[in-house]
């Protein structure tokens, strides 16, 4: 991430805060006259011009063209985010609305992922994505054995991450549905909450048929544990396409393509997983060329000892940082509650 910004005088901070806030709203260069006319800073317009010139000299503002107005630089936005923005939270009415949406939905992983992406995109007016929670070691929640034929059964394995796996099991001798159900109930009671090591530790007490089931269960859990990627849910790309910065160029389309590339998304996921907490990436920060014209707010959600995922909102560099941060933080809290419920408290 970028180094911590230097200190500015209180008056410089006040001017920079107003320029950033005004530009976020208007998307046009901000002049000293506009600041002087709209805000009472207790100083003359000439003093405001002098402070804006000083901020430009120090790299916090810039002239986009011959206009008298100025716009924030990436350094200016970074100072605003880290020093001037302060803490913000969603209004209680909005929190209640979002909370109601989630709790109206069934406790279903896919449904919650899609809802989270839609809520993030709508409330933050950006492009949103969320990755399904992953555990370093999956744990068994429930299993069933369904008779298909005298010598063929269907193994249904439900893991605590909400993952459902199905496998065809070839039987060495015919088994009735009653026999299969009894075995499934016994093994569910024996293995509920177990990871691979826990399942394997019971093998000496199993019958030959139960060991056959254990072979398939362990193989399925091993493949789940060693998968290298996870599902990504996206929403709100049109929110980017409709921003004035991107209406007449193809930058938004380049951004859209980048977000569709799994490798690119996984790099961003790795960033938040490595740093922890909530992360704000402004203008790519020299690391991601495809993000040079946007900012991203990222957060991790879940329960560290059980399963975690990431979510994020991408928008123009002049995004509403305070609101976006509060939306991302609140949705990540709700998703953490969902993970806790799925895995059992």
Image (spheres, helix red, strand yellow):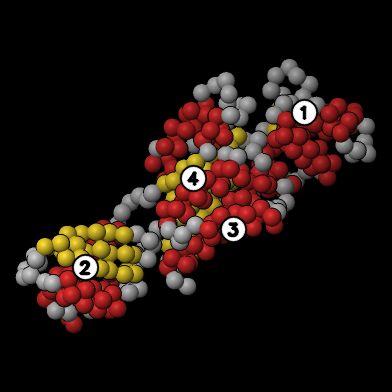
Residue at left offset 17%, top offset 71%: 177
Q: Secondary structure at mark 3?
A: helix
Marks 2 and 1 sit apart, C-alpha to C-alpha, by 68 Å
The location of residue 186, given as percent across then percent down, is 24, 79
Marks 3 and 2 sit apart, C-alpha to C-alpha, by 37 Å
Disc 2 crowd rating (10 Å Cα; few below 14, some 14-19, many 20+) is: many
Residue at left offset 53%, top offset 38%: 236
Dividing the picture into quarters, in which one does residue 154 lie?
bottom left
Residue at left offset 54%, top offset 52%: 299
Q: Identify residue for label 1.
A: 30
Relative to 321, residue 61 above or below: above
Q: Identify residue for label 2.
A: 145
Q: Secondary structure at mark 1?
A: loop
Q: Identify residue for label 4.
A: 129
Camera-nearest label, 3 or 4 = 3
Q: Identify residue for label 3.
A: 99
Furthest residue toward left: 173
Counting residues from the start of the chain, the first of labels 3 and 4 encountered is: 3
Marks 3 and 4 sit apart, C-alpha to C-alpha, by 19 Å
Q: Is residue 166 left or right of residue 8?
A: left
Counting residues from the start of the chain, the first of labels 2 and 4 encountered is: 4
């Amino acid at each position: 991430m970028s180094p911590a910004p230097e200190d500015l005088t209180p008056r410089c901070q006040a001017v920079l805060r107003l320029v950033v806030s005004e530009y976020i709203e208007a998307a046009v260069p901000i002049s000293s006259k506009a600041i002087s006319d709209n805000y009472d800073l207790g100083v003359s317009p000439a003093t405001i011009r002098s402070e804006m010139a000083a901020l430009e000299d120090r790299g916090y503002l810039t002239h986009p063209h011959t206009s008298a107005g100025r716009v924030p630089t990436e350094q200016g936005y970074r100072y605003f985010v880290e020093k001037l923005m302060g803490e913000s939270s969603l209004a209680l009415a909005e929190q209640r609305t979002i909370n109601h949406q989630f709790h109206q939905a069934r406790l279903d992983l896919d449904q919650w992922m899609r809802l989270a992406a839609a809520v993030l995109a709508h409330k933050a007016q950006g492009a949103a994505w969320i990755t399904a929670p992953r555990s370093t070691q999956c744990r068994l929640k429930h299993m069933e054995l369904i008779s298909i034929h005298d010598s063929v059964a269907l193994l249904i394995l439900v893991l605590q991450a909400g993952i459902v796996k199905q496998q065809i099991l070839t039987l060495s001798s015919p088994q009735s549905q009653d026999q299969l159900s009894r075995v499934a109930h016994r093994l569910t009671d024996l293995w509920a909450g177990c990871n691979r090591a826990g399942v394997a530790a019971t093998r000496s007490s199993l019958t030959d048929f139960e060991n056959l089931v254990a072979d398939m269960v362990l193989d399925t859990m091993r493949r789940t544990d060693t998968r290298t990627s996870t599902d990504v849910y996206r929403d709100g790309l049109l929110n980017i396409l409709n921003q004035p910065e991107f209406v007449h160029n193809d930058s938004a389309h380049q951004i859209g393509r980048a977000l569709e590339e799994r490798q690119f998304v996984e790099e961003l996921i790795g960033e938040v997983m490595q740093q922890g907490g909530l992360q704000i990436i402004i203008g790519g920060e020299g690391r991601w060329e495809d993000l040079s014209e946007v900012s991203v707010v990222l957060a991790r959600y879940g329960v560290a000892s059980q399963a975690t995922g990431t979510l994020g909102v991408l928008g123009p560099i002049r995004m509403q940082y305070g609101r976006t941060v509060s939306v991302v933080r609140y949705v990540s809290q709700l998703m953490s509650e969902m993970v806790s419920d799925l895995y059992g408290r």
